[in-house]
Image (cartoon, coloured by chain):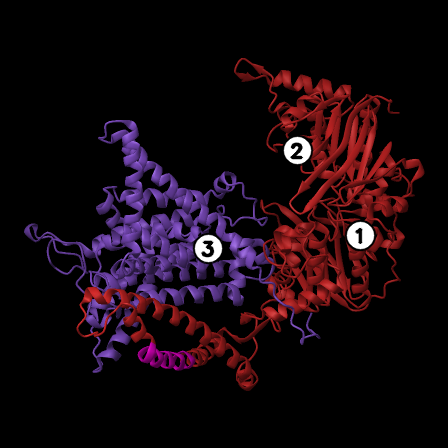
Amino acid sequence: MPSNEVVLEVIGVTKRFPGVLANHDVNLTLHKGEILALLGENGAGKSTLMNIIYGLYHADSGTIKLKGKEVHFASPREAIHSGIGMVHQHFQLIPVMTVAENVVLGEEVTDGAFLDRQEAARRVRALSEQYRLEVDPNAVIEELPVGVQQRVEIIKALYRDAEILILDEPTAVLTPQEVQELFKIMRDLAARGVSIIFITHKLKEVLAVAHRIVVMRDGEVVGTVLPEESTQESLAALMVGREVLLRVNKPPARPKEVVLEVENLSAYDDRGHHAVNNVSFVVRSGEVVGVAGVQGNGQTELVEVLTGLRPAAGGHVRINGKDLTNASPRAVTASGTGHVPEDRHRFGMVSSYTVAENLVLNVYYAPPYSTAPSLRQLPFVTVLYAALALGVFAILAVIWNALWKAALWPLVLGLHGIADVEAASRQEMAGPELFGMLALLVMALLFAYVAHRVATLIMGRLQPVIAPFLKRGGENGGVVLDHDRVDHNAVTLVKQFDIRTPSVTTTGGSLSGGNQQKMVVAREFGRRPRLLIAAQPTRGIDVGSIEFIHQQLVSQRDAGAAVLLVSAELDEIMALSDRIVVMYKGSVVATVNADSVTREQVGLLMAGASAEDVLGQVPAAVPALA
Amino acid sequence: MSEVTVVTTAPVRAVNLFGRLRALIVPLLAVFTAVLIGSLFIVLTSVFTGTGASVGENLVKGVQTAGAAFSGLLNGAFGDSSGLTRTLVKTTPLIFSGLAVAFAFKGGLFNIGAQGQLAIGSVTSAWVGFAIRVDLGNPVLSAVVHVTLALLAGMLGGALWGAIPGLLKAYTGAHEVITTIMFNFIATNLIAWLLYAGSPGEGIPPGPLNDGNGVITRTPTIYPTAQLPVIYDPPGPQALHLGLFLALIAAIVILLVLTRTTFGFELRMVGLNPTAARYSGISVKRITVLTMIIAGALAGAAGAMQTLGVNYRYEPNQSLGLGFDAITVALLGANNPIGVILSAFLFGAMDAGATRMQFNSGVQSEIIVVIQALILMFVAAEEIIRTMYRIRGAGGPAQKLSTGWGQR
């Protein structure tokens, strides 16, 4: 149990970013040997607060006291030297180096000019024994499982004499079993006097491991509670600011015909290794099939092959009975497939495109967003437009010319005091000619603009007349983007999917993570696809958005879509799936009905246990979480 | 969504005029700062090398010289009708070549090869200009046909020179920065061979496109029918040709293509996020090649302007540095076609006024190159300007100037 000694105190910290109050009057105390959970949705200000403590940001106001002494860190280096260690969500390890080398990096033990590898290994071993963090100092990082890599990160912090350890979303990449191990390590460390700040948005984990829970919302601390006095529901309500439905209301599935058929599919990853091995399964209309597995077991590659982003090395993919193995992403989309990609920043959106543009990102080429003509009809339309524009231009020019000769030119000459053009010298004429040239330039631009507007207007009116001669764009689409339709679509979807954005012309990148994801989901779900492939649809987003996306998934299913859900979150798989496909090292180890297995059994399958062993035995071999 | 039910109430597209004006702040300050530092150079030169009695006297002289230099520059560029004409004539190819760089930037490609594309375009347009005789009976008709042919030949030459690096990028992953630089050299040497004057004394024949004068590296003059029509001829050596209008039209067309067409939507997406473009079903390879073809055609048009509108033949020094100034023009114009027009005008004015500046103040015209280089530095490293004047970032991610190696 934690002592009463306060090691870290945050008093009235406020941090403002342009347009956002990231932290407002935040207070926090951390005791020696305490595990303090910092709970909050994405964008609640947890990371900002930790970055202030860690010296990456400076608070606008407020103070931070370390063991009673006020500190101002200018950089993480100073924070580290004062005994604060941070384990980031994305590990900062060098894959090709050994554990010991990674640990001492930047604080090397040297023997003259050379790195003393043996001494480094000895110190790492001593640390790992002292804190019971099992790891081989001479192992190469890239060969270690993720859970062990995380341990190396913790050792790295302890090596720098960290007394305060900040763990940023440490469970995101772990299997359920590894999570249990991590919790054991955390409790051990706390018992030895290390204070831990544990950042997360997972309610179960908070209740399982924390001594005290600080909940943040919109940059403010909205409550400090004890786990004994809290439930998942109460925490969620505190976090979101309203009652949240944690369980998905899901009527039983009524599967119908097969929509997606995957047969003996194989594929390589980017490094040319086998990533998907001989995978087969089907997804029917009206059911959710969940693909469970720890990150990096071939799910990413599987989805990429299904959606045309990665070539298959063997096997077949059939959608609605049509063979779409190695088809283009566009052909897959056109077959009635919606795809929520697992990495929205890389695949799902363009940050500097507007919300409206992002909402048509993969359907912009088709009607109604892209209007006739198609590329082949372009010459005809161009000639028509050019004729119209030239006609208008000519009429304007004739009128202006008459006006110029009759009134304007004499006026200019008069201003320059030239009575007789014939008699004037070239030198005298320079001024009026210059003026005349500029006037011509300005008028030409003006005429061109007017002619363009008039021609466009007439073209719009002519559209119904010439429409029979013009077919709407095919696979390559029309030529002109209809911004009005694009915006209309956005207005509808923003309302329907509750995307919080100031306007549809705001850039997608400026939305919060949850709303960016809702934007991607809105685009893919809004088309009412026959097949929906959702990869990690709720990764890194807030509880409120998760709830919404889950409901949408189920309603898509009930509307008759076949849903393939790929998720590293076992809870999500368990809550939504009707059937579960478990992947391990690129192969399907089991396909089971969701209501006939327990969470623990799926967890074991994900860790590579064989189907006979797991499904043949009584559950509860693994301690239940929380 | 296949059906959109509400069509009657069009949502108003927010036109953020203030936001657009804000975009001007950094380029304007970059130019201002560069001019300031340029003046400082002039003053310091006077302080260290001046012939005055004291440092103070030299300082005063230096300030006077700087003043004289810039008034000379403005005078030479805008002072009279021939100055303004000179400015506009110099602006014309810069608009085209600036567009060539800016358009490629929008597609995520750093086109350093505008110089080579432009040179090839000059030569091909010159070739059509002097090798083909167009006589259709009517002089106006002949001129229209011949000029159009020569211009198209220039664009085609440039497009070819752009297409090869585009293909290499798309299919082998060779970085366009390297390949376009290499193609500049290839263009230079190819042209040197084509136009080689030969050495009659030693029996070395001239290159295939040389006019046979035996001394100078150049093509024959083009037929009068291939000359761009002059629309204004003030006293002085320069005459304003039709090219300026073509350049303005090109800028507007490029703007419309980028913002209003599905092709522009695809091109910008490939530039901003190629993986998302792939996800959206866009052939990134196709867009990459097309981007380079169009960029090359624009650069080729810039070269044709010099051949058909100014020199009436090709001589290697007529396009010197135009393709490299284009990079600064594009960056200063924030890769926006309208911005390119404005910055090309600025650069055209600087080039046009340089001689008068040197004549009036004695300051070497090379100071203009220094100022242009400083402008490039300040717009490329925008952060310097933002820090100097304490301007907050625009918020959005900056346009990436170059991407890594690899196939697209």
Q: Which mark is residue A516?
A: none
Which chain comes out purple in the rendered image?
Answer: B
Tags 2 and 1 touching, CB below 8 Å: no
Q: CA distance from mark 2 to mark 3?
A: 35 Å
Q: Residue at x 68, y 59 (%)?
A: A339
In the rendered image, residues at marks 2 and 1 fall on the same chain = yes
Instruction: From this view, report whether residue A133 is shown above or below residue B266.
Output: above
* Residue occupied by mark 3: B335
Which chain comes out red in the rendered image?
Answer: A
Q: Amino acid at mark 3?
A: Asn
> Residue B88 is drawn in which quadrant?
bottom left
Extent of the magenta region: A391-407
Q: Amino acid at mark 2?
A: His
Residue B408 in view: no
Determine the secondary structure under disc 3: loop
Instruction: From this view, report whether residue A368 is shown above or below residue A291.
Output: below
Q: Estimate how packed mark 2 is, as few (under 14), some (14 to 19) or many (20 or more) residues with alpha carbons within 10 Å.
A: many
* Residue occupied by mark 1: A544
In this picture, residue A50 sits left or right of residue A612? left
Q: CA distance from mark 3 to mark 1?
A: 40 Å
Q: Estimate how packed mark 3 is, as few (under 14), some (14 to 19) or many (20 or more) residues with alpha carbons within 10 Å.
A: many
* Residue occupied by mark 2: A58
